[in-house]
Image (cartoon, grey):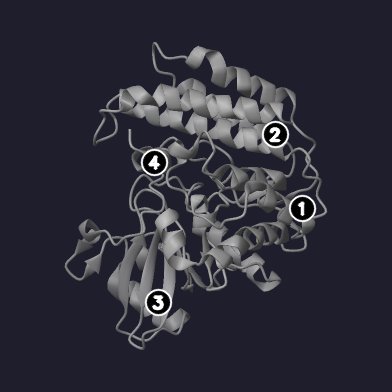
Amino acid sequence: MGVETLAGHVEKCAFWLTHDGQPNWESVAWRRSRALLASEIMGNEVVGIHHAKVSEWMVEHVGASAPIDFELIAGGRSNLTFRVTDSLGRRYALRRPPTSHVLPTAHDMVREHTIISALHPLGIPVAAPLGLCTDDDVNERPFYVMEFVDGAILRDRASAESSFDLARRQTIGDHLATTLATLHDVDVDAAGLGGLAKHDSYIERQLRRWRTQYEQMRVEGVDHNGLVEAVGDKLAASIPTQQRVSVVHGDYRLDNTVLDTHGEVRAILDWEICTLGDPIADLGLLLVYWAEPSDPTAALLGAAPTTAPGFASRDQVLKSYAAHSNLDVSDVAYYQAFGYWKLACILQGVFARYSAGATAGDQGSVAEFPAHIAMLAATAQQTLEKN
C-alpha cells in the first residue's frame, strides 16, 4: 500500500470518538477533504445548505449582504464546513453536521460554538464566532458562522516547502508548542467550560474505550500475536497522575492549524472532539504526528510536512512546550506511546471494515494492514519503554 494511501485510510476510515469519549460507531470520519466536492452541488443549491433561508438568516444575524454564495470546503460524514461569500466579497465560514448518519453527541454545533466563544476572548487563536442558529426550520440542523481565517494549512511536505522558507520552518514548531501551552493554561471554570465533560481519569477512560473498539473489530485469524493487548495492558498499569484539568483539543497537529506568513498560529481548527482532560495527551499526540524522516512509522503517516528540511526536531518542540508551561513533561513518552497505540486501534477498525467488504475502493493491499498495526503497536511499546 502506498504511503499516501494508507495515511488517507487512517484519516478517512477511523472510528473517531464522540466529544464525550464514546466510540462513534455509526459515522466514518471523512476528515480534511478540503477540496470542493462537485458531487455535492445540485444546480445552484449546495447540498447541506437551504440557500434562501440560510441567506436570509445571515443577513439578519451576521450582517451579510445578499446575494450569498456557499461553497463546501470540508465535508463527508464529519462536520461540514462551507466558505460563504457575500455580495461585498466578505467571507465567512459556516459549520453544520453531516447530512446523514448523524449522532447528536458527535456533531453538536452548540457545543463547538460554546468552546470557541469561550476561548476567543481569552486570546486563544480561534476563528471569531459570529452567530449560532438552533432553529431547525432554517437549515434542518443547527449551524454556526465564524470568521474565515486566511493563511497556510500545511498538509504535506510539498505544501510546507512551497509556503515557507527554511528560516520560517524552523520557528513553526516553537509557535505551535507555545500555542498549545497557552490553550492548556486556560482556567476551564473561569472560562465557563467547567461543565463541558468529566474532569478526571481521562487516560483511563480513553484506554477502556479504544480497547473496546479494538476488541469489537477483531478479524478472524489475525491477532498480531497479542501485541496490541499487551501494550494496552502496560499503558493501563502505568497511567501518570493527571496534573491538571485542561481543555484538550483531541487532534492538535500542524494540519489542524492556520499559519500566518511568519509561521505563527492564526487559528486552531477542528474542535469536533474537544473535551476536558489531561493536557499532556494533546502534547503526546502532537509529537506523534511531528514526524521525523528517521521515524519507523514515517512511511505509515505519509509525507508529513515536518519531514521537510528546516523543521525543528521533536525534542525541540517538546522543549518549547516545557518552556512555556509549568506542567511536568517528564512522562511525555507515555502519552506518545498512547498516541501510537490509539492509531493501531484505529487502523484495526479500518482493517476490519475492509476485510468485511464494507469500504468501497481498492482493497488490494488489505493484507498489509496487520503489519502496519503491529508496527504501530511495537512503536508504542518501544516509546513506552523510554518512559
Label 4: which residue? 28
Of pointers 4 and 2, the one earlier in the residue sequence:
4
> Mark 2 belongs to which amino acid?
Tyr
In the figure, 2 relative to 369: above or below?
Answer: below
> Mark 1 belongs to which amino acid?
Ala
| Inter-mark Cα distance, 3 to 4 | 30 Å
Question: What crowding class fits label 4: few (fewer than 14 Cα within 10 Å), some (14-19), or many (20 or more)?
Answer: some
Of pointers 3 and 2, the one earlier in the residue sequence:
3
| Inter-mark Cα distance, 1 to 3 | 45 Å
Residue 322, numbered circle: 1
Question: What crowding class fits label 3: few (fewer than 14 Cα within 10 Å), some (14-19), or many (20 or more)?
Answer: some
Label 3: which residue? 57
> Mark 3 belongs to which amino acid?
Trp
Of pointers 1 and 3, the one earlier in the residue sequence:
3
Label 2: which residue? 334
> Mark 4 belongs to which amino acid?
Val
Question: What crowding class fits label 1: few (fewer than 14 Cα within 10 Å), some (14-19), or many (20 or more)?
Answer: some
Of pointers 1 and 2, the one earlier in the residue sequence:
1
Q: In which quarter of the image is the C terminus?
A: top right
Q: Where is residue 368 in the image (x, y as percent from the top left)?
A: 36, 25
In the figure, 306 relative to 207: above or below?
Answer: below
In the figure, 345 relative to 144: above or below?
Answer: above
Residue at figure coordinates x 35%, y 63% from the top left = 73
